[in-house]
Image (cartoon, helix red, strand yellow):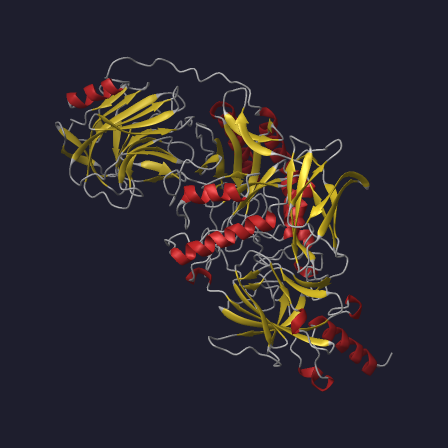
Amino acid sequence: MSRARWTAMLFAFVVALLGFAVPAAHAGDTPQWHRLTPPLSTPWTADVSPSNALPEYPRPQLTRQKWQNLNGVWEFAKAGPGDAAPVGRALPERILVPYPVESALSGIMRHETQMWYRRGFQVPRDWRIGRGQRLLLHFQAVDYEATVIVNGRTVAHHTGGYDSFTVDVTDALTTGRDQELIVGVTDPNDQGGQPLGKQRSPGDGIFYTPTSGIWQTVWMEPVTPAHIDRLDIVPDVASGSVTVTAQVGGPVRQHVEVIARDHGTVVGHAGGDANQPLKLGIRNPHLWSPDDPFLYDLQVRLSGGDEAGSYFGLRSIGVGRTADGRERMLLNGKFVMQIGPLDQGFWPDGIYTAPTDAALKSDLEQEKALGFNMVRKHIKVEPDRWYYYADKLGLMVWQDMPAMKDDVEPGPAARVNFESELHRMIDQHRSFPSIVTWVPFNEGWGDYEVGRIADEVKAWDPSRLVDAESGVNCCRSEPDSGRGDLYDDHTYTGPGSPVQSGTRAAVDGEYGGLGLKVDGHQFDPSGSFAYEMEPDSATLTRRYAELQQRLKLVAQRCGVSAGVYTQTTDVEKEVNGFLTYDRQVKKMDFAAVRAANLDVINGVTGAAHAGPVVASGTPGIDGIAAYPFDENAGTVAKDVVGGHDATLVGGASWTAGESGSALATNGSGQFADTGAALLDTEGSYSVAAWVKFTAPGDGFQTVVSQDGGDHSAFYLQYSGADHRLAFSVVGARALAPAAPEANRWYHLVGVRDAVSGTLKLYVDGQLAATRSVCLGEAATGHTVIGRGQYGGNPVDYVDGAVDQVHLYDRALSDAEVSTLYSSGR
């Protein structure tokens, strides 16, 4: 073959990939796409090319024979406000669709707020477009506002970064072979008020690199004028049936025929009008579950000639009472303990877009191999093929709605848009059997009217559970609305021990976050962090097993139905994954993790368990240790009851007390150390103290605590996050109703009652707050006065004075607290 002919053939191949005609005379000037170098490379990075840009069929729940993928190399350019569409005009750069513009795989690797995409396409002649067939152009996801122009004609404008949209472009086609497609995109990212999940510019901490532009597959297909737009499939295990509604567009009323098959054998059949529910009874129904993810095939035909394939699973999800009297999550009428990872779906090479279909599937395969039966898809919506693989592999999915910005109160327009996008997310995913729970809000990020939204989600889809606010105990969350099907607690390191009550199931929606830095596999070595960092893989694995044993105990004794561990992979600066961010290194012993997970699933059955055995404790109001701080000199504070004298540390000194003298600390490294673990923090106990704060502000100040391995088992404190006095454990605070005054003495008593599973805070002899916390946490470190512990470090030093500290190995009664306060001790 001659060199000239080889060059011509190569150029023709490039033109085919680019999708638009380029005059041969200018072939040498044609810009090329180049894969750029990502911060980390995954096992699939090198597989990405113009001929392998997610070529798989993108819509597994509504399949047709004829279709064409439009992924590949497109022209690209930065745009400015008011720029005219580049109709008939070549653009200067090349981008690989569908990878976000910020990603290395796109070939651009920078953020743009406004941008243009351009390519040409040809419609196969045998599709007979305009002769009884229409041409649909599909965008699986574009972030955020997209304008679609075909042959100079604007055919669509779409707002929303997580839902697919379809355009009938038939009337915009020309009679020639070559057609021009232009997409204009605007994405304000975190400067707008739209749902954006964890995207931030720039990414930092628990927020990550943004995604802009086309980030899921673009494709086209021919259809009849009357055609199926969507299939809504709702299983009914109780009756052994499935209801199918064919959402049909087009001008003519259509008759629908629906056929269900089990490996080719017809097991159900129904017919009727389009856009109406059709119920199919299924012979010998075979239920879907994580242990047996059985799927039926579905064939749907219209009288007008359209035909589509699909599938479904028969399963039910609900809340019901188990033998222990708790309300728990039920799958197919039976309690199944749900455990899974927080799955954020970020990639170092493709950001929001997995580099290949195999990569997309791999995360789910790893989760299944680890023994999980559930996964929480965290404030991101994935391509349809991700849910298809969850259906096939047998992983229940909790689907979050991508949050609005966490630190901005959404205005009226933002709320209307949020609810529109939420509704579309549910509509477009309601037929995946793996999805069992909708999660509209997370930790208060952009939340509003949580109860109303939860009720509306339940009305939109009554076949699934609703988690009104994941992490309702945390961060910026509104007070618990009491709505939805779940009470969801977040505790790091945790897991938390929420008490199931009422008609809702209790779940640990996030816990864990154990970290390990792996050299050569960190996104930002200088900024890597975790909630609890471990020195090596063996320690990390051991600590994970300990957390799972704690989860098992919490589930058995407290009625918790599920636990979500943070997280599947490291994500940018977070290094708390089972896998590194590049998916190259397993950070734990996966066999040991699987064994720990299966032990929880199999060991929590909903059977009745005996309550805790709690000793009666030492009678009287003297307690087991008492520190009057009346020495007024020296570096030792006498324990006048138990003999565990406390040592003043860091220059702590003396001042006038509520009675006599008191411990004085300056908020910076000063405290008193009793030298021992004086309380059994898994049982009942009480702590009391007089305290005066110099300046209660935004910081925490802890009056009495007891050190654990990573954090204090309890904190009698001032909470700077709430500007309230508090009796706290990690993940829960019993808060006084009003802010304290500076330079005023307060008498605080914290009571932990292991029998009732509560924390109580008393202020000046009166009960100020009660909080349910089912289990205490073991802590064998020293009991200390004037600071707390978190992340393995001393924190929350008191700036002020502490007097008359008492410790008790039992829960004090209301009357005893009142007596203690009145005595001035």
Residue at left offset 63%, top offset 39%: 395
Give the side of residue 422 with respect to residue 731, left or right.
Answer: right
Q: Is residue 554 visible?
A: yes
Please tell me whether residue 457 is drawn above or below residue 521 in the rendered image: above
Residue at left offset 75%, top offset 53%: 303
Q: Is residue 525 visible?
A: no
Please tell me whether residue 588 is drawn above or below residue 274 in the rendered image: above
Tell which residue pokes out farthest to the right in this image: 1
Please tell me whether residue 120 is drawn above or below residue 158 in the rendered image: below
Residue toward you, 61 or 304 = 304
Question: In the rendering, at what x and y percent does residue 171 appear?
Answer: 66, 72
Residue toward you, 81 or 372 = 81
Question: In the rendering, at what x and y percent does residue 621 appear?
Answer: 23, 17
Question: In the rendering, at what x and y percent does residue 87 appear?
Answer: 60, 79
Question: In the rendering, at what x and y percent does residue 527 appear?
Answer: 46, 53
Give the side of residue 579 with respect to residue 358, left or right.
Answer: left
- Using the rendered view, name the quadrant where residue 190 is placed: bottom left
